[in-house]
Image: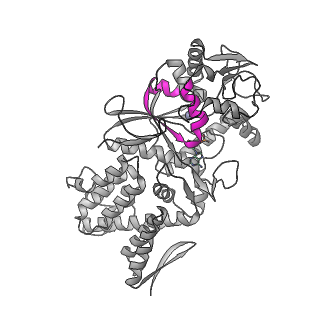
Amino acid sequence: MPFTFYNTLGRTLQTFEPLCAGTVGFYGCGPTVYNFAHIGNLRAYVTHDILVRALRRAAYEVNHVMNITDVGHLSDDADDGDDKMVKSAAERGKSVLEIADYYTQAFFNDTDRMNITRPSTVCRATEHIADMIALIQRIEQNGYTYFTGGNLYFDISKFPSYGELALLRLDDLKAGARTAVDENKRNPQDFVLWFTKSKFENQALVWDSPWGRGYPGWHIECSAMSIKYLGEQFDIHAGGIDHIPIHHTNEIAQSEAATGTKPWVRYWLHNEFLVMDKGKMSKSAGGFLTLQKLIDEGYDPLDYRYFLLGGHYRSQLQFSWESLTGAKNARKSMLDKLHLLADKVSGSGIKNLNTEKAEKTPSVTSVVDYSSFTPAFNKALEDDLNTPRALAELWGLLKDTSIEPQAALTAALDMDRVLGLGLEASLQTEQPACDEGLSHEIEAFIAERAAAKGEKDFAKADKIRQDLKERGIALEDGPGGTTWRRI
Ligand code: AMP
Ligand code: ZN
């Protein structure tokens, strides 16, 4: 079955057909490295990771390119406000490049801990200034620019399909425009391709260009680097929904103006936001949570990954410590189940798995035929990367005692090639002994109920509680998660 993705360009579910059979060119907007990533940002990168893993498991060769923004991103996407990198460097008494290096490393430290596969190519904006200048020259030669007040602007009135991605209507925009922030702009949505008149004294990073010494606008880096590494037309581009109206809209205008190839990108995927207390998580508003903070509170980075997979990437996801605890408990139950299966397979207990890994841990190339357990899982992923359903399929497999253990274990590890919950690695470490008398079965029900609540399937969650009650087991929800006791 082919994949179906919701394409923001056109706002429909579309069957995925790559430009070249069997290969996928994918560009995901990377971080602006002036601070730590917050856990909302990490939702975007887990989404990219699931996409890449699902395509690779389906035998596509994926070329995944990601940029690192280390120059030119102002605090307002529309060329207004402070330069994020310069401001951060000044506040911390460091150079811009020191800040960029520090937070780039911190970013990959976070993504590694969350089992997010590193992109095939990571490209820094500051190392691609020549590519940006060359692309801007093409845009200029094609007649889409004007130079005024020391800056080179993109003239959106020359690009009739401007705003197609975001369903922006230019007439409405003009009518409703607030006073243009930059009086040099002919249209409020025009944007800077190259700055020479910095608003900031001592702009740290500047380069010579045909328009004078200066630095690039933010949007041009993604056009220049994606075209460099993926070609003038490629398959998929992704980012958070905040990028639709300005950043991605401007990327399309620049790229298509330069190359004349339309559409520049065939499928646009956007993840919804992680929100806290009904507000968006942002670095400026309060509630800025990092992965390290979750770790300090006693959570494993993979607990957070499990939590994210419980929501579909196109739905807003509400963060709370309680739901993170639910995910933590569910993941623990999953690992318990997996170890029990491994126990049955090895017949000699999980303690031996460390030393006898080669024989005891089945590999995904095992001769055991597990293929009949994966179609529903595959279908969930093919259906616009439906991770909550994929997770439920994995649970169904782990709980189905009628399946031969070796086949179940092999299938579970195969599914985890996409989910990335570290199941295979966990088999190589000894599980802490379970509390005396604690039933794995009840833990699995608690996990299933937490997942049902996460999906807002309260009827199912209530039924699980009721079923257990009838068996003499009471579930109690507390701040530390759900516990059980005999009635
Ligand atoms: P930035 O480092 O600010 O450029 O953002 C990195 C990525 O995180 C972008 O794809 C954003 O769209 C995305 N993003 C920002 N905030 C959130 C959030 N609260 N939830 C999900 N994604 C986000
Ligand atoms: Zn971008």
Q: Residue furthest bottom?
A: 487
Q: Quadrant of residue 411?
A: bottom left
State whether residue 427 is above or below residue 479.
above
State whether residue 372 is above or below residue 19.
below
Residue appearing at x 30%, y 69% in the figure: 349
* Quarter in which the C terminus is drawn: bottom left
Residue appearing at x 46%, y 30% in the figure: 265
| Residue numbers of the magenta segment | 225-253
231 in magenta: yes
Where in the figure is residue 162, as x and y percent of width and height? 57, 27
Colouring of the image: one colour
Q: Is residue 274 left or right of residue 363?
A: right
Q: Quadrant of residue 243?
A: top right
Q: Residue furthest right?
A: 201
Q: Is residue 430 visible?
A: no
Q: Is residue 126 left or right of residue 93?
A: left
Q: Is residue 431 left or right of residue 276?
A: left
State whether residue 350 is above or below residue 160.
below
16 in magenta: no
Foreground pick, 438 / 217: 217
Where in the figure is residue 339, as x and y percent of width and height? 34, 66
Q: Main secondary structure of the magenta part?
A: helix
Foreground pick, 196 / 121: 196
Where in the figure is residue 377, as x and y percent of width and height? 32, 54
Q: Is residue 94 left or right of residue 257?
A: right
Q: Quadrant of residue 443?
A: bottom left
Q: Is residue 347 visible?
A: yes
Foreground pick, 209 / 286: 286
Where in the figure is residue 42, as x and y percent of width and height? 54, 48
* The image quadrant in which ligand 1 is located: top right
